[in-house]
Image: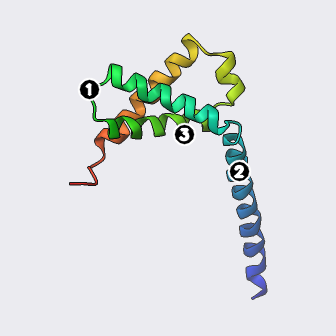
Amino acid sequence: MIKYIPILIVLVFMNFGITKTLLAKEERTLNFSSKNIRILWMACFNGGHTQQKLPSDTIALICDCVVDKTRTQFEFDYTLKNAGPLMKSVYKRFIHSCQKEIVSKPSLSA
């Protein structure tokens, strides 16, 4: 029994480290307000209708994915400071990545 104590201690510290890392990532996503998320999502959705020939529900899923990627990888202030060509290229990359993820998944209704 005593020989398992060091293993237990290591597991506790590992769990604390993993939890701390996950919480740090979650804190980062709290930087976007609901209004910021809504504006970003609506811009994506409206742009999707003018650029893509996809059904609305597919565009909505792609925009959900784009917003999630944006709010977990960038601070809101960064997106404001770099609005324009830089963020436009980032959003295009996210859209392309999300489109591949969403369109390649089998349909739930099938």
| Callout in the foreground (3, 2) | 3
Q: Tag 1, which secondary structure? A: loop
The CA span between labels 3 and 1 is: 23 Å
Q: Dot 2, how many residues are within 10 Å of its Cα: few (below 14), some (14-19), or many (20+)?
A: few
Label annotation for residue 110: none
Examine the rendered structure and indicate whether residue 40 appears above or below residue 11: above
| Furthest-left residue in this view | 110
Residue under pointer 1? 53
Which is nearer the N-term, disc 2 or disc 1? 2
Which residue is depicted at the point 46% across and 25% down? 93
Which is nearer the N-term, disc 3 or disc 1? 1
Number of numbered discs on residues: 3
| Callout in the foreground (2, 1) | 1
Label annotation for residue 21: 2
Which residue is depicted at the point 51% across and 17% down? 88
Q: Tag 2, which secondary structure? A: helix
Residue under pointer 3? 68
The answer to whether 49 appears left or right of 66 in the picture is left
